[in-house]
Amino acid sequence: MTFTVAIIGRPNVGKSTLFNRLVGKKLALVDDQPGVTRDRREGEARIADLNFTVIDTAGLEEGDQASLSGRMRAQTEAAIDQADAIFFMIDARIGIVPTDRYFAQLVRRSGKPIMLLANKAEGKQGDAGAIEAYTLGLGTPIPLSAEHGEGINEIYDALREALPEETALPAEIEEEEGERPVFDEEEDGTELDISKPLRVAVVGRPNAGKSTLLNRILGADRLLTGPEAGITRDSIAVEFQWTLRDGSERKMKMFDTAGLRKRANVQGKLEKLAAADALRAVRFAEVVVVLLDATIPFEKQDLTIVDIVAREGRGLVIGLNKWDLVPNQDLRLKELREEADRLLPQVRGTPVVPVSGLTGRGVEKLMDAILKVHETWNIRISTGRLNRWLAPVIEKTPPPAVSGWRIKIRYMTQPKARPPHFVMFGNQLDALPTSYERFLINGLRETFGLKGVPIRISKRNSKNPFDKGGRKIY
């Protein structure tokens, strides 16, 4: 049986370090600066034979409900409500401070099982703080070093004691119920496997409205939002079921990311870490939504982000957020779609969808575009269809001769998808001009409907039959 644990505590006590330790990956950003984490992040944790969901939360701070710290605290309180148990963490080197006592009352009122973790307890310096933690009235503190992995065995024992039913081993359940537990078998992957969550990253410049849009899609205030630019730092993954127009459901995993500014404007270690985390989300995704501010679209940074997505080989959808603020919408949408084709020739035909995260307008069309692009990203075209298209194209517009030598394209095939990757076979293909290669890519895109995805082309030269050394012709 699975269960959920939330890690709670004031800023800079090591919550994200413990989160990374439990999930076995550096998913959460970690820095000496207090208040790095703002949203709540979920991960699949493992300690020995225990598998559970762990939630990393923002550091608890007192503040007005409408302020940023107040909204962060609301996200933490939502994590407490969601959890089956709570890790309440303090800094053993600093000891107990008034903020610890204030928020200890908050978690005590939740009625959930609480495990008191005295982090940074390695060495003699942390002994006094661990002993002082008794005064919080939350039970026996567990000395811990999340950085070095000390104290994890004690957390395991505390979880087994606090949640006996949820942490019971399969053999124990079998003895109690007299039935053998059934485990799902791993599914084989294919080019398009709708049983697996569709991974979508939402990226863009700061304050484009990424978190607001995702909250609208989820139908809940899952992500921290506000008028301040740069609220999101970690890339937050959220899994959910999206109801399609035919009534069926599709598993989705969407990533909210930090706003990406020009590299020259990125200041400080923390912002660099956040930008790197956003780029990792792009690499992990299958489809990327580049969200633009419709009032100031296609800034230079927007084009740079699209180019990164294309180079990474991900499906692409362009969202025009804050569409409710745009006048003359029909005319403006036509202009922006033409501008997209002109400015982004490497992904010509990419869906451009107007949307408003504030009102919810256009969300259905945006999700339809994501699903369509994902289907295109997985497409594989038969060799027969490809060459029935290729032959008349080459006959009508043959490749230009290079240094008096004729370039011959014999045939084409598609060995893989995700994104569509084609291989041309012929003679002297390394001398094929980039302009002609782009001509073929545009033809593939228009003929086979490969819109919203980058197209890769490789070239294979035939061997010279008169060259005994087997050299290739160039």
Image: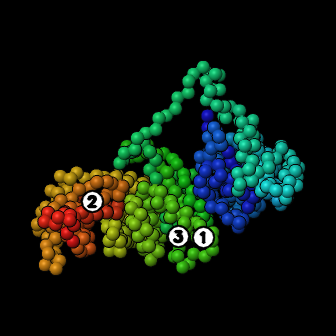
- Residue 12 appears in the rendering: yes
Q: Amino acid at mark 1?
A: Glu
Viewed as shown, does residue 265 lie left or right of 381? right
Residue 458, quarter of the rendered image? bottom left
Viewed as shown, does residue 356 lie left or right of 56? left
For label 3, the residue is: 260
For label 1, the residue is: 271
Viewed as shown, does residue 69 lie left or right of 297? right
User: What quarter of the picture does the N terminus occupy?
Assistant: top right
Q: Amino acid at mark 3?
A: Leu
Cα distance in 3D space between marks 1 and 2:
38 Å
For label 2, the residue is: 422
Residue 437, quarter of the rendered image? bottom left
- Residue 461: x %, y % from top left: 22, 64
* Residue closest to the far top: 178
Q: Residues within 10 Å of mark 3 (few under 14, many from 20)?
A: many
Q: Earlier in the sequence, mark 1 or mark 2?
A: 1
Q: Earlier in the sequence, mark 2 or mark 3?
A: 3
- Residue 221 appears in the rendering: no
At horizontal 72% and vertical 43% (from top left) the residue drawn is 153
Cα distance in 3D space between marks 2 and 3:
32 Å
Nearest to viewer (mark 3 / mark 1): 1
